[in-house]
Amino acid sequence: MKRFPNSAAFICSRTGFASSAAVMSIVGYIVGLGDRHCENILIDQTTGRVMHVDFNCLFEKGLKLEKPELVPFRLTHNMVDAMGVTGYEGVFRSHCEHTTQLLRKHKDPLMSVLDTFVHDPLLEWNFSNKVHSSVSTRKGKKDNKDKQQAIKDANIVVVNEFANYALDRIRLKLDGYLQYVKLSANGQVDELIKEAVDPYKLFKMYIGWASYL
């Protein structure tokens, strides 16, 4: 109560927290954003709204970690408690459903933007450059040049395959598919929330993710 001058300001801040958390949860799920531990989710102490940082773990990279991230977004008991007596059944759920409907409605322009982002030539350049540096110390200039070109060409193919897979996964999510079953926006949100709060999935998360908070 020290941060809020009155009860109205507190309720407004709590609503801002739940609504912004809902929007980022669904958007993060669609683009496969992982690594949502406590240090990557910041809170504005005035408005209560959440702000995410560190977007390095995109396109479901979290599923490929040594300890895979099994939940679609962060919805731990501390977050639910901060949403008030209704928990995730109030503002959070309604904003999740509305966000899902909006993303589906604007699927085509969204996919166009993501297609440009995922196929960014700089991504290929960075990927190939790492391999180039790892083989630069080998002997034989001609052999090195041939090997490096072959590796670069192979890496471009790998990156493009990964990009196509990532876009296909996003497209399926926007179409409402969850484990090969097509759901309505409300049904999809309901299943995602169930997964996010599933204790059997949360206790398998990496300890640094702090699923107990």
Image (spheres, helix red, strand yellow):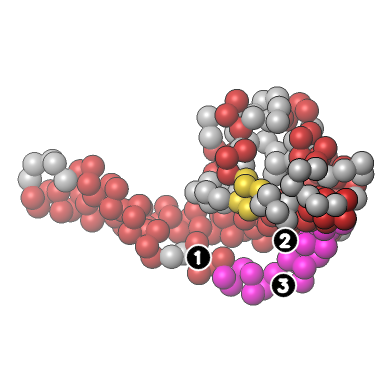
Q: Main secondary structure of the magenta part?
A: helix
Q: Nearer the viewer, mark 1 or mark 2?
A: 1
Q: Amino acid at mark 3?
A: His
Which of the 4 image quadrants contains residue 120? bottom left
Q: What secondary structure is marked by label 2?
A: helix
Q: Amino acid at mark 1?
A: Phe
User: Do the residues bearing badges 1 and 2 touch, measured as CB atoms within 8 Å?
Assistant: no
Q: Which mark is residue 140?
A: none
**Magenta residues, as a range?**
93-113
Toward the bottom, the furthest residue is 109
3 or 2: tag closer to the N-terminus: 3
Q: Nearer the viewer, residue 197 or 126?
A: 197
1 or 2: tag closer to the N-terminus: 1
Q: What percent of the width, then of the height, locates residue 159?
A: 43, 55
Q: Nearer the viewer, residue 151 or 8?
A: 8
Q: Residue at x 57, y 55 (%)?
A: 166
Q: Residue at x 77, y 68 (%)?
A: 102
Q: What secondary structure is marked by label 1?
A: helix
Q: Nearer the viewer, residue 61 or 140?
A: 61
Q: What secondary structure is marked by label 3?
A: loop
Judging by the rendered image, the residue that carries numbered circle 1 is 117
Q: Nearer the viewer, residue 71 or 78?
A: 78
Q: Amino acid at mark 2?
A: Leu
Q: Nearer the viewer, mark 3 or mark 2?
A: 3
Whether residue 15 appears in this view of the structure is no
Relative placement, left or right, of 203 versus 167 is right
Judging by the rendered image, the residue that carries numbered circle 2 is 174
